[in-house]
Image: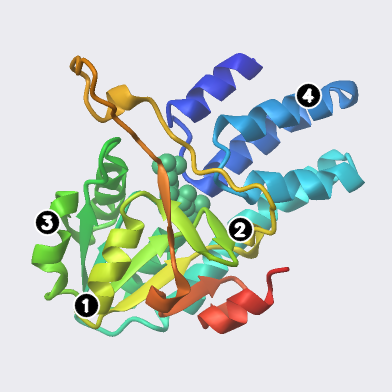
Amino acid sequence: MLSRLIKDIKTMDYQGANQIAIASLEYLKKTKLKDFEKVSKQLEAARPTAVVLHNCLEVIRKDKSINTINKLINQIKRARNQIGEKGSKLIKNNSKIMTHCHSGDALSIIKEVAKTKRIEVYATETEPKHQGIITAKELHALGIKVTVIEDPAAAYFMKDMDYVIVGCDAIRKEGVANKIGTYNLAILAKKFKKSFYMAGNTLKLDNRKKFEIEERPVKEVYAGKLKGIKVRNPAFDVTTYDLITRVITEKGVMTPANVKRLLR
Ligand code: RUB
């Protein structure tokens, strides 16, 4: 049911740009052609910041077939493995990596590195929805050493890190959008002279004119009553290219200048 899927996307049963896109694409395979536009718009509006689903819909509009949808799903999955392979070459043995939130593309690199090198991962809890715990459990299940830290502890631990690796929701001219708090980590990485890597497939290249940072329910931030006090809960921020060491895509490890050339 569409309303159920949209609820699950909004409440983050499906989270991360790629997972949201894949769940939506799977639903569209079962959607009648005449309902395609209406359903697509509703799915896209559920989490408007990430661009993967939008870019997939643009492709599907040119050829509304199950074959096209399947190709896109496979492209996302294949790219994840390629990002893992390409990104893992950047990471040295015996290193400490900080990550944020839960990104399949970023974790693909970490998991690939861990096959041959000794690493230790610091996962920020990721306020307010704790996606960092999903990350920590996933890595722990693979036998990867992982420590959970509170988001505000990032500065405390940054001096001990070798790299920060995070995902992307939208790769734009002005910078790269990812989970709120990513920008903080990038500023810290710069201060402590650590490499800051953002991982994402090329379906995350974002040429949209209208770009919206999703603002989520305020009760996720503070569940109590605050009379007359405003609470805000943006879900993403945009990290500027001066803070990004490399963007790791399935097509290669790119400098900020290379990435910007791919955007209109
Ligand atoms: C998730 C998040 C992820 C990106 C990339 O935010 O910001 O880093 O979406 O994920 P949320 P992936 O939990 O609010 O969806 O690499 O899996 O596409």
Element type at mark 2 = helix
Q: CB of mark 4 within 8 Å of CB of mark 2?
A: no
Task: Report the amino acid beneath label 1.
Answer: Lys
Instruction: Sort mark 4 into few (<14), some (14-19) or many (20+) by Cα contacts within 10 Å.
Output: few
Can you give x and y, in whole percent of width and height, for residue 261 in the image? Answer: 67, 78
Residue in the foreground of this view, choosing between 33 and 112: 33
Mark 2 sits on what residue?
Answer: 204
Calculate the distance from the C-alpha at mark 4 to the C-alpha at mark 2.
23 Å
Distance between mark 1 and mark 4 Cα atoms: 47 Å
Quick check: is the Cβ at mark 2 less than 8 Å away from ligand 1?
yes
Q: Is residue 139 above or below residue 262?
A: above
**Lower position in the chain sequence, tag 4 or tag 3:** 4
The amino acid sitting under disc 2 is Lys
Query: In which image quadrant can residue 22 be found?
Result: top right
Q: Give the Cα separation between the discs numbered 2 and 1.
A: 27 Å
Q: The disc labelled 3 sits on which kind of residue?
A: Ala
The x and y percentages for residue 229 are: 23, 24
Residue 252 falls left or right of residue 154: right
- State the residue at coordinates (43%, 26%): 11
What SS does tag 1 mark? helix
Identified at 81% across, 50% down, the residue is: 59
Q: Are marks 1 and 4 in contact (CB under 8 Å)?
A: no
Where does label 3 land, which residue? 153
- Above or below residue 223? Residue 216 is below
Residue wearing tag 4: 38
Of callouts 1 and 4, the N-terminal one: 4
The reply to whether the residue tagged 1 has its Cβ within 8 angstroms of ligand 1 is no
Residue drawn at (19%, 51%) of the image: 151
What residue is shown with label 1? 191
| Figure quadrant of residue 82 | bottom right
Give the distance between the C-alpha atoms of the residues marked 1 and 3, in whole angstroms: 15 Å
